[in-house]
Image (cartoon, rainbow, N blue to C red):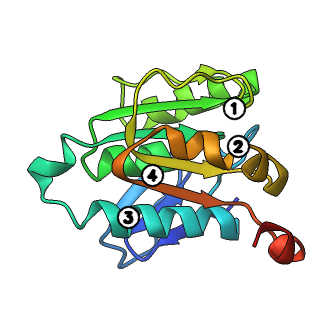
């Protein structure tokens, strides 16, 4: 793993690496082994780019009032990006135990201690509140099966950022 330019402003690397010479943006430290989301995959990059573009529309004070849910968090990369950009209310979960543990480790590697990833399954997850932003970088079939459910978890005017849809399923999802 040689690190990855996640967006123009975010570089992802392991803790023992240096960011590229001349890079002056944000750095995300993570251990990429054992979970999805090392910053190299196109769907992760797409979610990260949209998430960043959305968050920077808000002032730093407004960002503190936003809430986010990261479904299928994997490495926790999107939640880490959002926290670095100033969102202070983030929940994140994955249906598998290993990514939940890895996301917790990756949050700590970035000095983020206030969020605790948890294990849950989107198919059985019960929304107990609404969120300003929901991210879901998932398999196409999971997105299709749960699109309405995810939308119901948004605040009025909220944003659903989804990715993971391969080109072979483009016609299917339309």
Disc 1, SS: loop
Q: Label 2, on which residue? A: 146
What is the distance, in whole Å, between disc 2 and disc 4 at their CAs?
29 Å
Q: Is residue 120 above or below residue 80?
A: above
Question: Disc 3, disc 2: CB below 8 Å?
Answer: no
Which comes before the other along the chain, label 3 or label 1?
3
Mark 2 lies on a secondary structure that is helix
Q: Earlier in the sequence, mark 2 or mark 1?
A: 1
Residue at the (72%, 47%) spot, across then down: 36
Disc 3 and disc 2: Cα gap in Å?
24 Å
103 or 144: nearer the eye? 144
Say whether residue 165 is left or right of residue 75.
Answer: right
Name the mark nearer the viewer: 1 or 4. 1
Contact (Cβ within 8 Å) of mark 2 with mark 1: yes
Q: Nearer the viewer, mark 3 or mark 1?
A: 1
Of callouts 3 and 4, the N-terminal one: 4
Q: Which residue is mark 3?
A: 52
């Amino acid at each position: 793993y040689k690190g990855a330019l996640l967006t123009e402003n975010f570089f992802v690397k392991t803790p023992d690496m240096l960011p590229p010479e001349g890079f002056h943006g944000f750095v995300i430290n993570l251990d990429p082994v054992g979970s999805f989301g090392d910053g190299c995959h196109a769907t992760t990059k797409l979610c990260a780019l949209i998430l960043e573009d959305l968050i920077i529309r808000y002032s730093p004070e407004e960002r503190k009032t936003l809430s986010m849910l990261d479904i299928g968090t994997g490495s926790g990369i999107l939640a880490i990006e959002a926290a670095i950009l100033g969102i202070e209310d983030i929940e994140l979960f994955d249906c598998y135990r290993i990514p939940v543990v890895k996301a917790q480790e990756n949050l700590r590697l970035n000095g983020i201690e206030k969020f605790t990833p948890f294990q849950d399954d989107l198919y059985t997850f019960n929304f107990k509140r609404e969120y300003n932003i929901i991210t879901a970088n998932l398999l196409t079939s999971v997105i299709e099966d749960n699109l309405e459910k995810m939308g119901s978890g948004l605040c009025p005017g909220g944003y659903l950022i989804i990715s993971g849809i391969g080109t072979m399923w483009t016609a299917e999802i339309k």
